[in-house]
Image (cartoon, grey):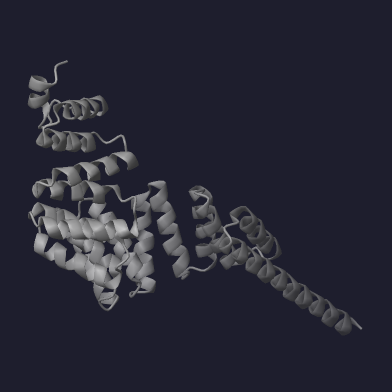
Amino acid sequence: MRRRGYLSFICTVIALMILSGCVASRNLSRGVDHMRSGKFDEAIESFSRSLEANPDFSEAYYHRGNAYAMKKEFDNATTDFTRAIALNPVYEDAYMARAVALIEKGDQAMAMPDLYKVIELRPDRTEAYVIRGRLFQKQGDAKNALADYTLAIKKGTGNDYQGYLYRGILLKEQGEAALALADFSKALTINPNDPGAYIQRAEIWLSQKKYDEAIEDCRQALRIYPLAVLAFRIRGDALMGKQDYDLALWNYSEAIDIYPNDASFYARRGDAWKKTGNKAAACKDFAMACKLEDCRKMDFWKWKDRNCGK
């Protein structure tokens, strides 16, 4: 009788464990569905119910952390990612997610160990190299940043778009225009639908006075994203170089319509008005530039002082 009673008890415990596991999994699945629909509060509620049924469910903590991160509640997110890692010390995605949440919080130094751990667990995860490279770059460590971007490219078997893009940006900052151009071109071969790479490349063309190439890259950027304000500005500069002042005016005006608080846009348009001989319009734009920013060190200051009055 005692043995039967013990077996009955064991069977009951196992049944309850199976039931709680089913409840936890069902709520996890519901939470993931809510996440896909952008219903983050409902997702958090479902993941919390999953954890009530199974407090040791690392995946529920991970997914709830992602839901908090989507709501920009990064303290709650990092707490949940930490709980997921405590339950599963080789949870690669949780380390990555915690690193990103820490970066969003501004705790870049705290994110570094997590990125190293991700790479230790999965050496071919190119995203981790790119993010770590960007942190190195922000810290002024160009050497390690360049190494990480290059590793991202190698580990991605030459198909890592972000590795080429961010290495190109770093090389551009270092004055390595030819190498940067090659990286931006490779990035665009892999992903031809990112306006940022076209804009980065257009800036180099502009600096080299290759105005037609700059204009074409700006056209491509604006085809993809019609509100790419920098593309209008760069194209305006290239048109000024070609002495096409009327089209330059139009591009600067578009830039101002999108972002009316940049003094440099007014200064550029004022210069274009000056080139066309419209002194009144030039003075008006120069005055607006000075209203937005101290313009006494800008190129137009002396001309404005002589020609526009007070």
Please, is residue 104 above or below residue 125 in the view? above
- Residue 296 is left or right of residue 27, and the answer is left
- Residue 122 is left or right of residue 305, and the answer is right
Residue 121: x %, y % from top left: 39, 73
Q: Please name whichever residue, 100 or 294, is drawn nearer the observer in this view of the structure.
A: 294
Task: Determine which quarter of the picture holds residue 21.
Answer: bottom right
Query: What residue is shown at x 33% (from left), y 60% (from top)?
Result: 224
Instruction: Pick the quarter of the image with the C terminus.
Output: top left
Residue 70: x %, y % from top left: 51, 54
- Residue 4 is left or right of residue 241, and the answer is right
Q: Please name whichever residue, 288 or 204, is drawn nearer the observer in this view of the structure.
A: 288
Residue 175: x %, y % from top left: 10, 55
Q: Is residue 126 in view from this perspective?
A: yes
Q: Please name whichever residue, 109 or 285, is drawn nearer the observer in this view of the structure.
A: 285
Please, is residue 42 above or below residue 300 in the view? below
Query: What residue is shown at x 14% (from left), y 27% (from top)?
Result: 279
Query: What residue is shown at x 15% (from left), y 31% (from top)?
Result: 278
Task: Determine which quarter of the picture holds residue 25.
Answer: bottom right
Task: Determine which quarter of the picture holds residue 44.
Answer: bottom right
Residue 206: x %, y % from top left: 12, 53
- Residue 258 is left or right of residue 148, and the answer is right
Q: Please name whichever residue, 293 or 140, is drawn nearer the observer in this view of the structure.
A: 293
Please, is residue 18 above or below residue 297 in the view? below
Instruction: Pick the quarter of the image with the N terminus.
Output: bottom right
* Count of residue discs: 0
Considering every residue shown, the one lying at the far right of the view is 1
Query: What residue is shown at x 34% (from left), y 53% (from top)?
Result: 226
Q: Is residue 172 in view from this perspective?
A: no
